[in-house]
Amino acid sequence: MADIHLLRDLQTIDTETIAKRRELSDVLNELKGSEELQAARIISTNSAETLTKAEAKQRDAELEMGSLKTKRNQSNDKLYSGSIKNPRELKDLQMEVESLDRRIALREETMIEILVGVETAQSAKDDADILLVELEEAWVQRLQELEKRKVELAIAIRDLQQRRKAQVARLPAATYKRYEKILVSNKGLAVVPLVRGNTCDGCSTSLPQSMLTKVRGGGIVNCPHCGRIIHT
Ligand SMILES: [Zn+2]
């Protein structure tokens, strides 16, 4: 096989290797974790904390309400028990019962707000938990796919490396050295086809007739603009 064809096939191997390595890097990156899942975990934890706080507020409010009602009932019982005869004392007690009733009415309004708060927090937590479970399940599945793909890519890259080694061995050392130099300076693309009959596919420069003749004859020709090796 002519050197130019060996170089073309070597480029195919290298291009494929670059693509596989890039994909492997993406897979490894994705394996580090899902940002979406991480965010859902934080939202779930935060919503649980919000609910706990709302429930504690509800318990405190219920206790306070209970104690206010007990106090009101005791004062009320005392008021109508007939044990207090002094009109001044009776009036004070009457006022105390009225004041407690007002406080109870106010607390009842607050209690409604607190209950709505608990309900809202519960609902937000339920939604966050449902989403979290969905994402956890999806992540477990994705993780399996990624692990599988990681192994496939590692094997493919190893095979490509072996093929590359064999291909390099078939080339004259000087030709390979020339290829490698262009490969490094051109981001992994050293050999490109001639397109539209006279143009370098690497940089879209038109080649002079003398070079085209050499390319068509199977010689190793470098593009005068980008330096890549051109094949037909
Ligand atoms: Zn070029």
Image: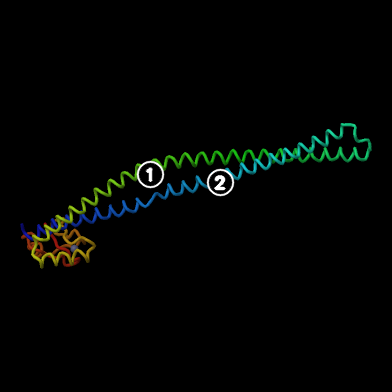
Q: Position of residue 178 (x, y in %)?
A: 14, 67
Q: Position of residue 97 (x, y in %)?
A: 83, 38
Q: Position of residue 152 (x, y in %)?
A: 24, 48
Q: Position of residue 7 (x, y in %)?
A: 12, 59
Count up the numbered dots: 2
For the C terminus, the image quarter is bottom left
Side of 109 relative to 79 (left or right)? left
Within 10 Å of disc 1 (Cα), the crowding (few <14, some 14-19, many 20+) is some
Earlier residue among tags 1 and 2: 2
Q: Secondary structure at mark 1?
A: helix
Residue appearing at x 31%, y 44% in the figure: 145
As displayed, is residue 195 above or below residue 107?
below
Closest to the observer, 23 or 83: 83
Extreme residue toward the front, this view: 83
Location of ligand 1 given as a quarter of the image: bottom left
As displayed, is residue 90 above or below residue 165?
above
Q: Quadrant of residue 228?
A: bottom left
Residue at mark 2: C-beta within 8 A of ligand 1: no
- The residue singled out by tag 2 in the image is 49
